[in-house]
Amino acid sequence: MTSKEEWPLLEVKNLHASISTTKGNIIPVNSISYSIKPGEIVALVGESGSGKSVSALSIMRLNAPEIKYKSGSVINYKGKNLLELKEKEMRRLRGNEISMIFQDPMFSLNPVHRIGKQIAETVKLHRKVTPKEAKDIVLDLLKKVGIPDPERRMSNYPHQLSGGMRQRVMIAMALACQPTLLIADEPTTALDVTIQAQILTLIRNLQEETGISVLLITHDLGVVAEIADRVLVMYCGKIVEEGTVDELFENPLHPYTKGLMASVPELSEHSKRRLETIPGSVPNPLELPKGCNFCDRCPYASEECGEKEPVLTKASAESDRQVACWYPLGKKGEINHYAKTSNFS
Ligand SMILES: Nc1ncnc2c1ncn2[C@@H]1O[C@H](COP(=O)(O)OP(=O)(O)OP(=O)(O)O)[C@@H](O)[C@H]1O
Ligand SMILES: [Mg+2]
């Protein structure tokens, strides 16, 4: 059962990651702060290039070495700043208490080993078990993630499995160490809609059974609606809106969130709904606008939006609702000219 206690399991504060290139500095993650409570499923959403994977890989400390963290960046896990841990201590946490389903499956599955052996190795790495016990745990994990005929499948190589099955195996691998925090980076993107729905239900069920916390990364708000508790919307390296799933779907405050909602594909094979996409494209990270990063694509932008950047500001007295917009939207999805936030000076 979930116990959404009040203290955060993970607390990210002012996380700032930059890459220095010959053409200038890129800031894939620009001073973001958020937290995840025990038992919570928090979704990180945003279009391609918004900094979701760099944020997630920062928690695992698996970003490319050219990505540097600004001093003052904090990723507290159970109160310890992961960015300051010795590599040895980090290795103990990684794939043990914190595990990740990577966007790129090549990260996780070795093509030359049978899947049963791969999962068993992970189990043995983290628990003192006999080979027979390891095998039973592997079988149990494969059953849990819905692999039919697990006894036979154990001896398959990754290429002998379908995309959906491989994804399930990756989830089994990620769960093999009984993590406290699971990071899932676009776990269903490459799969067809029926399998997507099954994998999402699987993650939700596993969360309910084991009480783990999940950081779920996706560009698809449809996925979010299915399983998340809380949502962080990212754009150009910044969090532009935060709220519970209900709050967000009932009343998106940021025009970008509203745009993402209009492009939600339905998780149904028979859906014929045409998808709208947000007009324009994500700005070049080397040439970000002076004011709000979304300004050039925003149907509601005024002149001042192009001049000064809005900061993430509390938008509700009762909840953790936050938005970074000079003119947040009203209940009907229309701009509320009286709602201009007070952070414009
Ligand atoms: N090693 C790197 N070198 C140079 N630029 C990088 C590197 N890693 C990430 N970036 C840049 O940082 C930005 C954020 O990348 P990131 O992979 O976090 O995006 P994302 O939100 O995960 O996108 P997607 O949905 O496509 O996975 C992008 O502009 C990307 O090109
Ligand atoms: Mg990514």
Image (cartoon, grey):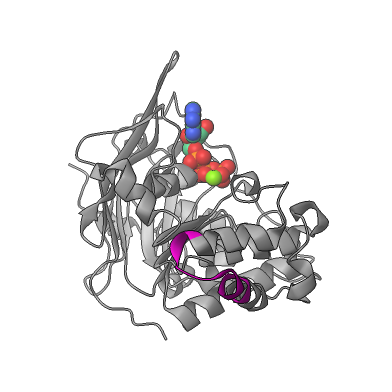
- Position of residue 152 measured from the top left corner of the image (x, y, whole percent): 80, 71
Q: Residue shown at 35%/29% (left/top)?
A: 290
In reply to whether residue 190 is colored magenta, the answer given is no
In depth, the one of 11 and 251 nearer the eye is 11
Residue 134 falls within the magenta-colored stretch: yes
**Nearer to the camera, 53 or 152:** 152
Q: In what quadrant does ligand 2 lie?
A: top right
Res 185 quadrant in image: bottom right
Q: Residue furthest top?
A: 22
Look at the image and tell me in which quarter the C terminus lies: top left
Instruction: Tell me which residue sits at (71%, 54%) in the image.
Output: 190
Tell me: residue 234, above or below residue 16: below
Q: What residue appears at the point 58 percent right and 55 percent down from the top-left corner?
A: 186
Q: How many marks?
A: 0
Residue 167 visible to the viewer? no
- Per the picture, the main secondary structure of the magenta-coloured stretch is helix
Q: Is residue 109 visible?
A: yes
In screen coordinates, is 303 left or right of 121?
A: left
Report the front residue among 176 and 249: 176
The N terminus lies in quadrant: bottom left
Q: Quadrant of residue 233?
A: bottom left
Horizontally, is 7 left or right of 333 in the view? left
- Magenta segment boundaries in residue numbering: 125-136
Residue 132, picture quadrant: bottom right
Residue at the spot 45% in from the left edge and 71% down from the top edge? 245
